[in-house]
């Protein structure tokens, strides 16, 4: 097997996709972002299918993998557009799509690069306490981290 064949290139891209998707899956699990967790899991399965197809010369596996890549590209483009608030999409209005109505946030919201987190605790008349967090002095806002993750996945597609 040559080093610069299409088969070798496809295997290399699949391995890079697996690494990027597993990394993304870890941070989505930390933030309980359920729709991306399900999508990442499916992507891992289809990338493994594509790896087997490339390694074992199975064209049907590669075709299924290619069809999945189109769906994956659309999903990541949707995420990029949502975080950039393109058109009618905005993260504030469509956050329930990503969390499947669990009101969780991206892990990067409170753990961004260089962010100073402040916690504001308030107590209501009923004795309930609510804790709100706010970030200051972030080098890179969480929206851009999510956009970079989705952009890298689009690049691999």
Image (cartoon, helix red, strand yellow):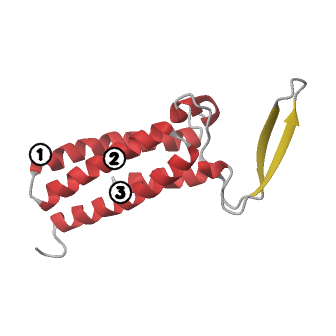
Residues at discs 1 and 3 in contact (Cβ within 8 Å): no
The Cα–Cα distance between marks 1 and 3, rounded to whole angstroms, is 20 Å
Residue at 78% from the left image edge and 41% from the top image edge: 132
Q: Position of residue 133 (x, y in %)?
A: 77, 45
Circle 3 sits on which residue? 156
Circle 1 sits on which residue? 60
Query: Relative to 134, is 152 above or below?
Result: below
Image-quadrant location for residue 128: top right
The Cα–Cα distance between marks 2 and 1, rounded to whole angstroms, is 17 Å
Is residue 123 shown left or right of residue 38? right
In the image as oriented, which residue stretches furthest toward the bottom? 3
Q: Nearer the viewer, residue 50 or 26?
A: 26
Circle 2 sits on which residue? 43
Is residue 92 shown left or right of residue 87? right
Q: Nearer the viewer, mark 2 or mark 1?
A: 2
Secondary structure under badge 1?
A: helix
Is residue 88 at least partly visible in the picture?
no
Quarter in which the N terminus is drawn: bottom left
In the image as oriented, which residue stretches furthest toward the right? 125
Q: Position of residue 3 (x, y in %)?
A: 18, 76
Marks 3 and 2, the one that precedes in the sequence: 2
Q: Which mark is residue 123?
A: none
Marks 1 and 3, the one that precedes in the sequence: 1
Query: Relative to 44, is 3 above or below?
Result: below
Residue at 45% from the left image edge and 43% from the top image edge: 37
Query: Relative to 146, is 100 above or below?
Result: above
The Cα–Cα distance between marks 3 and 2, rounded to whole angstroms, is 12 Å
Is the residue marked by circle 2 packed among few (<14), some (14-19), or many (20+) residues within 10 Å? many
């Amino acid at each position: 097997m040559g080093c610069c064949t299409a088969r070798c290139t496809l295997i290399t891209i699949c391995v890079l996709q697996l690494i990027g998707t597993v990394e993304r899956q870890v941070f989505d699990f930390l933030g309980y972002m359920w729709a991306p967790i399900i999508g990442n899991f499916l992507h891992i399965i289809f990338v493994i299918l594509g790896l087997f197809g490339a390694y074992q010369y199975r064209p049907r596996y590669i075709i299924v993998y290619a069809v999945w890549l189109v769906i994956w590209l659309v999903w990541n483009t949707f995420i990029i557009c949502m975080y950039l608030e393109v058109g009618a999409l905005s993260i504030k209005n469509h956050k329930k799509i990503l969390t499947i109505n669990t009101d969780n946030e991206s892990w990067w919201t409170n753990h961004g690069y260089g962010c100073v987190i402040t916690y504001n605790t308030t107590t209501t008349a009923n004795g309930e306490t609510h804790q709100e967090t706010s970030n200051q002095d972030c080098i890179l806002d969480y929206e851009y981290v999510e956009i970079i993750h989705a952009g890298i996945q689009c690049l691999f597609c």
